[in-house]
Amino acid sequence: MKLLENKTALVTGASRGIGRAIAIKFAQEGADVAFTFLSSVEKGQALVAELEAFGVRAKGYRSDASDFQAADQLITDVVADFGKLDVLVNNAGVTRDALLMRMSEEQWDTVMNINLKSVFNLTKAAIKTMMRAKSGSIINITSVVGIMGNAGQANYAASKAGIIGFSKSVALELGSRNIRSNAVAPGFIETEMTDAIEAKALEEWKQSIPLKRGGKPEEVADACVFLGSDMSRYITGQVLQVDGGMLT
């Protein structure tokens, strides 16, 4: 039996990178997958076809997770379309890097809204249906930067640290309803965003990691499959680092 068979999952920000890998891995493991995207409709349609090839139901929603009303409507639509929601993966995120002395209010607000407020918006909307079902797994994508900080990323680090505190609080509030809340903290993961880094700097990064390589989006997705499945049924309030030993 596949690990996520008979489960319905919602993955935000699934048009590329880690979110896309999570959606695909969930479908491979038998989950029906709803996902959000903000980029091209064509990309969304292509991902639906890719997911459906695994024999599951899939649907993409063009929705802004940082918009409170839109997030509430999204959960309503997903439950209407799929009948239930078992796993929520809050993955939507952006960077607007700058040293603090040069960081604008807009750079701060954009990152906090998309990375942190979106987690509040969707989790608040999703727990209504999860509480009725007396089960659910919430997986919030944070970052090792949220644990250790990073120069030039005060906004990003603050948003990702906030996700950790939020995840632990939700675990305490909803554990009695059999709803679990965990965070996954990726380290240096090779995606389209890291392709822009020059080769020498990339190699220096890799040498600083005990496993001597960057991670793959699929390796973050594997951790999410575990936390979404019944294999992790006694795990809540945790931060699972997927970082090759970068932060020990």
Image (spheres, grey):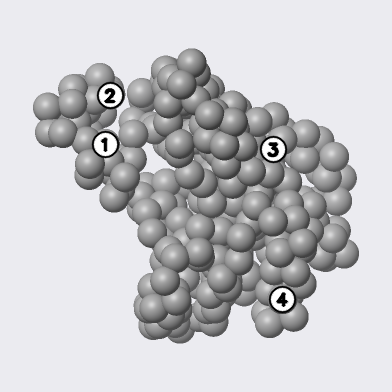
* Residue 184 in sight from this viewpoint: yes
Spatial CA distance of label 1 from label 3 is 26 Å
Relative to the observer, which residue lies in front, 106 or 33? 106
Residue at 50% in and 64% down: 38
Task: Mark 1 or mark 2: name the one nearer the start of the chain.
Answer: 2
Kind of residue at badge 4: Asp
On screen, 148 above or below 1?
above
Spatial CA distance of label 3 from label 2 is 26 Å
Label 2 residue SS: loop
Spatial CA distance of label 1 from label 2 is 8 Å
Q: Are marks 4 and 1 in contact (CB under 8 Å)?
A: no
Label 1 residue SS: loop
Q: Are marks 1 and 2 in contact (CB under 8 Å)?
A: yes
Residue at 69% in and 56% down: 67
Tell me the residue that label 2 is attached to. Answer: 209
Task: Mark 3 or mark 2: name the one nearer the start of the chain.
Answer: 3
